[in-house]
Amino acid sequence: MRILKHNSLLKLVNSYLIDAPQPTNISYNWNFGSLLLLCLVIQIITGVTLAMHYNPSVAEAFNSIEHIMRDVNNGWLVRYLHSNTASAFFFLVYLHIGRGIYYGSYKSSRFTTWDIGVVILILIVGTAFLGYVLPYGQMSLWGATVITNLISAIPWIGQDIVESIKIIILGNVILLYIILPTIGNIHKNALKKINKISDKKEYISIPKSFLAFLVGLIDGDGYIQVTKTTKGFITIKLIISLHINDLSTLEYIKSILKLGRLNVYKNLRSPTCKLIINRTELQEVLFPLLIYNNIFFLTETRINQFNLAMNIFQDDIKIYENIPLKETTKEIFKLPKDAYNYTKLHFFKNWIVGFTCSEGSFFIKSNNDGCFQLKQRMHTNLFEAFKLVFNTNRKVTTINNYNQFSVSSKSDIQTVINFFSFEGLHPIVGLKHTQYIKWLSNLQNSTRYSKLHYPKWAP
């Protein structure tokens, strides 16, 4: 005990916690304040942890909550702890207030303390309301609608206050312009040809799952074209080229992006259709959107094309002869160094869906084995990452400088079905979707695969 009396720091602690004089009528009712402090500490810790995985956007808020609940280790526990501690917080607050009223803590000489407590209560209610809205589900949406419309009951000015929410929306629009900056300089005449600037706010709400799907499709059946005009200037386009029978896929992409033009070439030996996105649209919308969402191309050819185009935009290079050499091109994004780091990319699974739509196949072999296959030029680490995602030991084969990943065992086929049908990823679209449905039907009718778990919508 002597050290508690002589050490300056411990002496201070001792005077407050051990030797502090207390009134004789003190009871357990005075514990509510310390319990509220404990709840506040838990809320801060769990709240910061949840914020690390939360996406504050209208399009992805609810999905990020599902991600926390399903994918993050013990995410469900952290969220439930945060939610239930919030309820306990209010329960203890009301007990704290009740004790104060019972013992007259609001009376003379304690006015200031009581007033501060009222202000804190209002702040707690406001904070809780904002937290309730964050998941942005049906309960959050209509809860926010009801609460904000309560303000309209204020005489004379209530309705004006509710309508002033438009100011907040305007501020949000201004913020969106900051979030999606234009890359490089664009000539005013080029801007007149497209009316995209006023619509930038719409692009923020495009789901990340779609953008990852799109990038995967481009990695397979698209390319960024950098060519020289007759006068020596640079022209840049992003082109997605598919068979004409897959026109619906490009129409779907165009309906979401509202960018580019569709061209159909029926007279070729292999009739094709192309979605062509011009330089201005790349600078104004698509590339800023990919960078904002931290989504990039994952094949060496495509990422080199992207890095080159970004260098041209950022350095405002106009003459083709001034294009930097590959060795001097600044890397906007570096490909992962090993297969495992591919799997850690937040967009990788949805990217695989898009890549499958261009380079994947679902088919039945001559021996009636079901098979899922991905095939493209040499990308060893990328194809090894497919093995990790689909949890298989099947070797990646190399034929004529092409990597090929294929699975056909019952357990592997079930993993493939689970991946494309039960993980909540972007759906397969176009011809590949038709192929997938037919594949599932054939598997269900086969002896070997009939007892697998299939989606309810499968034929």
Image (cartoon, helix red, strand yellow):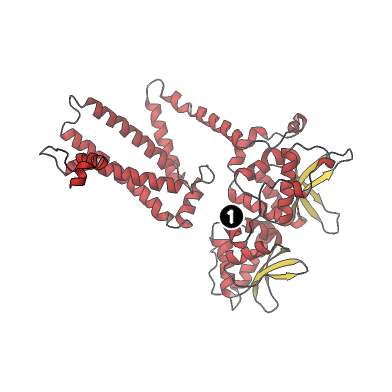
Q: Give the answer, above or below, for where 456 lies relative to 329.
A: below
Indicate the quadrant where residue 171 lies.
top right
Q: Is residue 5 visible?
A: yes
Q: Which residue is mark 1?
A: 345
Across and down, in percent, residue 352 comes to 63, 59
* Residue visible at 75% across and 46% down in the picture: 328
Q: Is 82 displayed left or right of 171 in the figure?
A: left
Count of numbered tags: 1
Q: Is residue 236 left or right of residue 452?
A: right
Amino acid identity at mark 1: Leu
**Is residue 275 something one can see in this rendering?**
no
Residue occupying the far left of the picture: 24
Of the pair 314 and 377, the residue shown nearer to us:
314
Q: Which residue is at a point 69% across and 46% down the rendered structure image?
A: 254
From the top left corner, tell me how far across and down residue 36 is, in percent. 28, 42
Residue 158 placement, left or right of 208: left
Return the x and y of residue 340 as percentages of the image width and height. 59, 61
- Front residue of this view, candidates 16 and 385: 16
